[in-house]
Amino acid sequence: MEENVIIANPEKLEKVKKLISEGGAEKLHVLADFDRTLTKAFVGGKLIPSLTSILRDGNYLTPDYTSKARALYDKYHPIEIDPKIPLEKKKKAMEEWWLTHFDLLIKSGLNKKDLENVVGSAKIESRKGFSEFADFLKKHNIPLVVMSSSGLGGDIISMYLEKKYRKK
């Protein structure tokens, strides 16, 4: 194991590894975030925080997008992180935030061509080893579910993976 990996609870890790091993690959799936998990956080020495930021910083969206998105963040983020708010109320607020933000993206001019331009840019790069990881999962019939909290998930992730990893 890498020297810079810190395992807070080695006993728990061993128990989880044993459960996975005993359960078999047919009972396993991998759930992963796209932005800064499967993709690099830094590209060309610059921090790339999310797909949405690439669209925003590339002037694909209307000038008022940033202030409106920030207002949504200011409204909903305190709800997201407040441990005193009941889970059901929190879920409802997070869904409302996601839907409102998605609507804002559309009203701010987001379109499929812009997503294709972002995918074609050099700003999104997979982390080292992702291709081998995905190949391993495919070989062992282990589903990989890729999500993105940006609200752009499905289309842009599919476009990226198709462009980058389509076997010719």
Image (cartoon, rainbow, N blue to C red):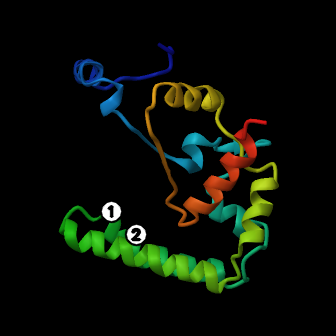
| Residue 125, position as x, y percentages in the image | 71, 42
| Residue 10, position as x, y percentages in the image | 28, 19
- Taking the spot 62% from the left edge, 62% from the top edge, the residue there is 155
- Taking the spot 61% from the left edge, 78% from the top edge, the residue there is 105
> Can you tell which mark lies on residue 105?
none
Residue 85 seen: no
> Can you tell which mark lies on residue 81?
1
Left or right of 6: which side holds 88?
left
In the figure, residue 56 lies in which quadrant? bottom right
Label 1 Cα crowd, 10 Å radius (few <14 / some 14-19 / many 20+): few
Q: Which residue is mark 2?
A: 77
In the figure, residue 41 lies in which quadrant? top right
Q: How many marks?
A: 2
Whether residue 67 is situated above or below residue 112 in the rendered picture: below
Q: Could you tell me which secondary element the residue under label 2 belongs to?
A: helix
Left or right of 77: which side holds 121?
right
The amino acid beneath tag 1 is Ile
Label 2 and label 1: CA atoms lie apart by: 6 Å
Whether residue 48 is situated above or below residue 28 in the rendered picture: below
- Taking the spot 57% from the left edge, 32% from the top edge, the residue there is 134
In the figure, residue 156 lies in which quadrant? bottom right
Verify CB contact (< 8 Å) between mark 2 and mark 1: yes
- Taking the spot 51% from the left edge, 15% from the top edge, the residue there is 2
| Residue 126, position as x, y percentages in the image | 67, 39
Label 2 Cα crowd, 10 Å radius (few <14 / some 14-19 / many 20+): some
The amino acid beneath tag 2 is His
| Residue 32, position as x, y percentages in the image | 47, 44
Whether residue 15 is situated above or below residue 158 in the rendered picture: above
User: Image quadrant for the C terminus?
Assistant: top right
Residue 150 seen: yes
Q: Could you tell me which secondary element the residue under label 1 belongs to?
A: helix
